[in-house]
Image: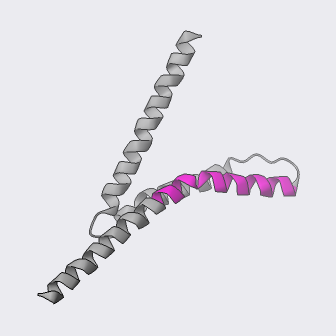
């Protein structure tokens, strides 16, 4: 039992490190001059969520299948939404800074 709980703690620590690394990578890519590098990780997570829909098993009922697919899409796209929020926040800061720089140059 102790070995299992130790393994779970190690896996949770690895997952936390992976998530923090992904967020830091998203911030780094969003700060680039071009807007496209910052959209790579959200695109990858979106495509992964679409692949998760293919793994949904048939329950026999159409309404249950539709509900299951929608739930899978909603839950699977939470990382996509988080990464897009980071992207928009970083790009907005960049846009405001560029406007301030232009305004300061015009004042001179």
**Which residue in the rendered view is the most extreme toward the front?**
107
Q: Residue furthest left?
A: 108
- Quadrant containing the N terminus is top right
Q: Position of residue 93 (x, y in %)?
A: 33, 68
For the C terminus, which image quadrant? Answer: bottom left
Q: Quick check: 64 above or below 30?
A: above
Would you identify the image quadrant in which residue 88 lies?
bottom left
Image quadrant assignment for residue 4: top right
Can residue 36 be seen at all in this image of the molecule? no
Residue closest to the eye, 42 or 12: 12
* Magenta residue span: 62-84
Residue 76, placed above or below residue 96: above
Is residue 5 inside the magenta stretch?
Answer: no
Q: Where 7 sits versus 74, above or below? A: above
Location of residue 46 (image quadrant): bottom right
Residue shown at 58% from the left, 56% from the top: 77
Please provide percent x and percent y for residue 96. Answer: 31, 75
- The answer to whether 70 appears left or right of 5 in the picture is right
Q: Can residue 72 be spotted in the picture?
A: yes
Residue 47, horizontal then vertical, whole percent:
54, 57
| Residue ID at (21%, 83%) | 102
Residue 16 is left or right of residue 48, and the answer is left
Q: Is residue 105 above or below residue 92?
A: below
Residue drawn at x 30%, y 63% is 31
* 32 displayed left or right of 83: left
Residue 81 drawn in magenta: yes
Between residue 88 and residue 100, name the one nearer to us: 100
Please give the count of numbered marks on the rendered protein: 0
Task: Decide whether the magenta segment is chiefly helix, strand or loop.
Answer: helix
Q: Name the residue located 27 percent from the left edge and 73 percent from the top edge.
A: 97
């Amino acid at each position: 039992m102790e070995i299992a709980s130790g393994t779970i703690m190690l896996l949770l620590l690895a997952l936390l490190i992976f998530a923090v690394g992904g967020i830091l990578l998203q911030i780094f890519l969003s700060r680039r001059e071009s807007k496209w590098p910052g959209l790579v990780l959200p695109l990858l997570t979106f495509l992964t969520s679409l692949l998760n829909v293919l793994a949904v098993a048939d329950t026999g009922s159409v309404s249950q299948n539709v509900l299951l697919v929608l739930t899978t899409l909603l839950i699977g796209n939470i990382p996509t939404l988080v990464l897009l929020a980071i992207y928009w926040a970083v790009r907005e800061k960049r846009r405001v800074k560029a406007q301030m720089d232009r305004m300061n140059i015009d004042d001179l």
